[in-house]
Image (cartoon, rainbow, N blue to C red):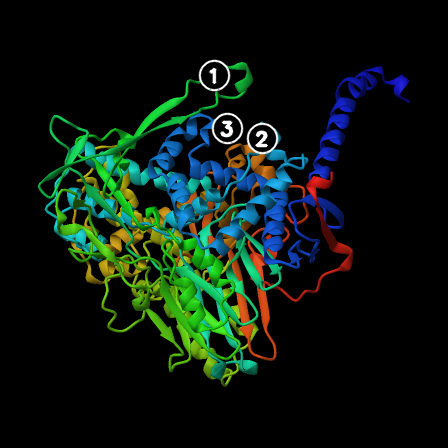
Amino acid sequence: MLNKHPMFLRLFLIVLLPIAMLFTFVWGYLQETLPEETGTLNVEGLNAQVKITRDDYGVPYIEATSDQDVFFSLGYIHAKERMWQLEMQKRMTQGRLSEVLGKEYLQRDIWFRTLGLSASAEKAIASLTPQAKASLDSYVSGINAWINSNPKLPAEFHILDVTPSLWVAKDSIAWIKLFALNLSGNFRKEISTLLAHQLLDDEMLKSIIPHVAKTELTLSKSSVNGLHDIAQLQTDIERDLRIGLEYSGSNAWVVGPQHTKGAHTILANDPHLGLQTPSLWFAASLKGDTLAATGMTLVGLPIIVFGKNNDIAWGGTAMMTDNQDLFIERPHHTNKSIYRFDEKWLEFTTRKETISVRADFPHHLRKPIKPVEIEVRESQNGPIISDIFRVSDQPIALKWTALEDQDTTYNAFFALNYATNWHEYKAALSDMISPNLNMFYADTSGNIGYLGVGAIPMRKGGESALPQPGWSNQHEWEGYVPAAEWPQIYNPEKGYIINANNKIDVPNYPYYISQDWAPPGRADRIEQLLKNKIVSSNGNLSFEDIAKMQADTINLPSRAILEYLKEFKPRNERQQQALDFMAKWNADMSSDSQAATIFIVWMELLRAEIFHDELANSWGNPTEENFLKGLANQVTLERLHHVLVSEQLTWCDDVSTNALENCHDMLSNALDGTLKRLSKLKGSDMGDWQWGHVNSASYGHFPLNESKFLELIFSRQIPNGGSSDSINVAISHFEQSKGYLQTLGASFRQIFMLNKANTEHYFMNSTGQSGNVISPHYDDMLLKFRDVEFTSFTHNTSPEKTLVLKAVNKQKQ
């Protein structure tokens, strides 16, 4: 047959056969990179044999005769499943991404070198308890045992020509600090408020920023631009690296046994972070000689961060604490190596940093790039972050709790795994420095509680919402609120406790915590549902009730605007058709709702219509323009509603025209823009405008999502509902060619039901357990997670999926 078609034969032999052979070779190699789930492995570094059994989702149940072997084994498993993720995390914290990703990441490396996360982590090692340090050492040994076993490396290492480097204890501590950075947005809020002061009049300022702090501080133009560039850099880092985003938050609530079926205490938790694949989290069950904990580990750490043991369960949300301050230093006018403080001249401490930068692809064929040398300065307040953008006339220092030398945060996470009651729970968490978290508690004896943890600065000048003069001692930190006086609630009369990053509900709390609380919409909805279900179930709340709450997509704050829109008069038939979809809509941002799509886009364009023309008068350059546009886009629905009902002509009149417009005109213009955008995206038939057709949850893979081809292989995208103010949160942004992409949302979900007789633990990770793209566990949780379905830690595992790690005595070899 082939002889009759010589052209086809040549094509087959020259092109198709080599491609098929290459594909077969590559696929065969990649199959060898998959982690073993059965059999026996000889592993150096263990004290005794360890059994690891997997469930259908690849969740490991680690059983060992000692806790140290559990920590070692978790390190080994993390390395087998998530080595690329560990390598990237290490390079982020050390400021070494440019070594493998090129000059595009140089600015990010300079930022992390300036913060000094890795150096700060190394100092923190000395503050660890012997037990906590031993757990880290065992974990480190487990990771390195896998690296040293000469394994077949996942595809990313070959695509980017990278060799994994050995892990050390400070890498784990540094990852906690980077995690904390993404839950600590105060320095950006200070920058935003200061820039708004510089660019807006008082009336505009009060309309956009709820809590306006006054300042007499004036900055040079270069300092203003430098501050904006710093804030933008952190935003870019969070977006590109998918390690968290501004407005990261969470939901958590606990319910006492008087309201529940079977007299369980119930704890529900779903932390919100930047979406990525693989997930930041790794579900595991850890059982040693004294340790018995299940839940979510943070890749890079050997313990359960949010989960349960035999006696208690714990979860958390970001506390939104004001734990960062910017200080404007005053250097000497001729000697820039010294700065003023309280009538004295102090010397900046300095250090040199050298950053290696890989040449562009193909780097082997290009001339090497000369390493970049930088000098990092620090004042007594912290690193001079303005040096990143060469703002030297007014150096700006960042003071942040996570940079404390005596950072005992890991002690807290470690001890939490062993706590058995409320007293031990509080004692364990008293070592927390950063991040600040609202930690929720439930136990098998029927108790529930809440504790706000982490260092809360006490300032001489009270609250600090703006950068302060570093040369004055009037704004110094005077220490931290004692752990015994952190906000707490235990067994409240109403029988439940709720937080969704909103203001902490502890009456008459004497210490300043923050002004950066999330809007109360999510928390209000949680409480509304809890009250309704407690009544309708006659005090028999079930797991199913709580799961439905986590799936809820009602946006309460939008209902006030919907009432206002009932008076809106459409200007044409097309607008009327859109209003018809919204006529009986109950503010449910479900994926099958056309009204949700119209409302979300309408409100986005309304913000632009109302605010952008007014703010344009303040635009002096692209830097200011980008900042002010971003500020307008962050106006909450509550404040937008206030503008509409008060008919504030300051905002609703278009200053670019001679006519006097009102808010109705702005609404109509924004609705026209909405219809135009959605018609372009999904066609003219509004029946096709379901929110899930327009909006997708985007789980990007770092850094391969930057390649369109590799993004198709390594990243994941799935249609989704939800909004920024719904319990099932979805924060999205518009991209011209892709529609709406959700880049922030729940990163996992857990529900615990505890009592003496029976404890149930339900969970679902956001994408999958494995970081290996050809593993069936790379994304097998994605669809179920989107649909808010759960699996459970029931030890319903198969003996056929048992892997034994056999201890090998190196000296006998």
Q: Is residue 138 above or below residue 784?
A: above
Observer-nearest of 550 and 633: 550
Which secondary structure, mark 2?
loop
Q: Amino acid at mark 1?
A: Pro
Q: Give amino acid for label 3.
A: Val
Q: Which of the labelled discs sits on residue 100, or is there none?
A: 3
Residue matched to label 2: 163
* Separation of marks 1 and 3 at Cα, in angstroms: 12 Å
In the image, residue 473 sits, relative to residue 524, either above or below, namely above
Specify few, some or many for label 2: CA neighbours under 10 Å numbering under 14, 14-19, or 20 or more.
few
Q: Indicate which label's residue lies in the foreground, 2 or 1.
A: 2
Q: CA distance from mark 3 to mark 2?
A: 10 Å
**Residue 181, percent from left and from top:** 37, 47
Q: Residue furthest front?
A: 811
Which of the pair 393/727 is nearer the observer?
393
Task: Tell me the SS state at disc 1.
Answer: loop
> Would residue 522 be found to the left or right of residue 19 on screen?
left
**Do the numbered discs 3 and 2 sit on residues whose CB atoms are within 8 Å?**
no
Q: Residue at x 86, y 18 (%)?
A: 5
> Which residue carries the number 1 mark?
368
* Residue 643 in view of the camera: yes
Q: Position of residue 27 (x, y in %)?
A: 73, 34
Quadrant of the rendering where the N terminus is positioned: top right
Residue 754, horizontal then vertical, whole percent: 55, 75
